[in-house]
């Protein structure tokens, strides 16, 4: 078996592993039916689609010839670190961290922190554009989650709302 595109082959493997992990993790939930979906229906469906897509990508990497074999380059850890840190900070700020007595800061602060930290992963950092993006994400999230879906979540920090 000759791998003709390393990037596609390993991307396909990652898709398959993540898809299968999601589908397997969701098997403990009630699946339901297409007419009355349970909480496990969407994760199993999404996981299966991801695994199938990964298999197609991996198969294509074995069949379709590329010029230089699409070698995998050196890992760039800085962007990976910023993206992981941004997601961790979002979760901590949104829900708080009781072990260190950090209260929940709300959706707005969490989105601003997420956007600012994740923007550091790129090669350019333009504060004006990042603040505009944060504002748009805050407004969109508020409209989507609070107004339309009626989710009960903290929007502002407790010291602002009282």
Image (tube, helix red, strand yellow):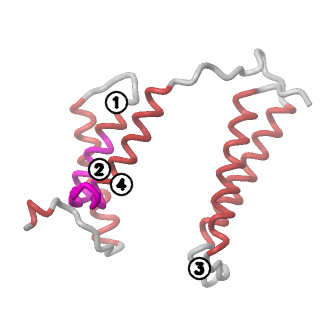
Distance Cα–Cα, label 1 vs label 3? 39 Å
Q: Main secondary structure of the magenta part?
A: helix
- Look at the image and say whether residue 96 sits in the magenta stretch: yes
Q: Please state the horizontal and vertical placement of residue 139, each as a whole percent of the image.
A: 25, 56
Q: Which mark is residue 38?
A: 3
Query: How many residues crowd around disc 2 within 10 Å: few (fewer than 14), some, or many (20 or more)?
Result: many
Q: Which residue is mark 4?
A: 91
Residue drawn at (28%, 69%), measured in percent from left and top? 153
Between 100 and 158, the one lying in front of the other is: 100
Mark nearest the camera among 4 and 2 is 4
Q: Range of the magenta residues? A: 93-115
Between 7 and 90, the one lying in front of the other is: 90
- 116 to 40, vertically: above or below: above
Distance Cα–Cα, label 3 vs label 4? 25 Å
User: First in sequence: mark 4 or mark 2?
Assistant: 4
Distance Cα–Cα, label 4 vs label 2? 10 Å
User: First in sequence: mark 3 or mark 2?
Assistant: 3
Q: Secondary structure at mark 4?
A: helix
Q: Which residue is mark 2?
A: 111
User: First in sequence: mark 3 or mark 4?
Assistant: 3
Q: Which residue is mark 1?
A: 120
Label 4 close to label 2 by CB (< 8 Å): no
Query: How many residues crowd around disc 4 within 10 Å: few (fewer than 14), some, or many (20 or more)?
Result: some
11 with respect to 133 (left or right) = right
User: First in sequence: mark 1 or mark 3?
Assistant: 3
Q: Please state the horizontal and vertical placement of residue 112, each as a whole percent of the image.
A: 25, 46
* Residue closest to the far right: 1
Label 1 close to label 4 by CB (< 8 Å): no
Residue drawn at (40%, 27%), measured in percent from left and top? 122
**Quadrant (top left, top right, bottom left, bottom right) of the C terminus:** bottom left
Distance Cα–Cα, label 2 vs label 1? 15 Å
Q: Secondary structure at mark 3?
A: loop
């Amino acid at each position: 078996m000759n791998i003709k595109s390393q990037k596609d082959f390993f991307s396909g493997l990652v898709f398959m592993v993540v898809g299968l992990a999601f589908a397997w993790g969701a098997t403990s939930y009630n699946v339901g039916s297409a007419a009355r979906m349970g909480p496990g229906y969407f994760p199993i469906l999404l996981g299966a689609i991801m695994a199938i897509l990964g298999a197609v990508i991996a198969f294509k990497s074995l069949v379709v010839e590329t010029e230089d074999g699409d070698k995998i380059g050196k890992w760039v850890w800085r962007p990976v670190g910023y993206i992981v840190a941004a997601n961790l900070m979002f979760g901590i700020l949104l829900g708080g961290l009781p072990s260190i007595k950090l209260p929940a800061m709300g959706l707005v602060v969490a989105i601003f922190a997420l956007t600012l930290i994740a923007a550091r992963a790129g090669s350019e950092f333009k504060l004006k554009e990042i603040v505009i993006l944060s504002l748009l994400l805050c407004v969109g999230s508020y409209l989507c989650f609070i107004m339309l879906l009626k989710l009960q979540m903290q929007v502002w920090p407790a010291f602002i709302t009282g």
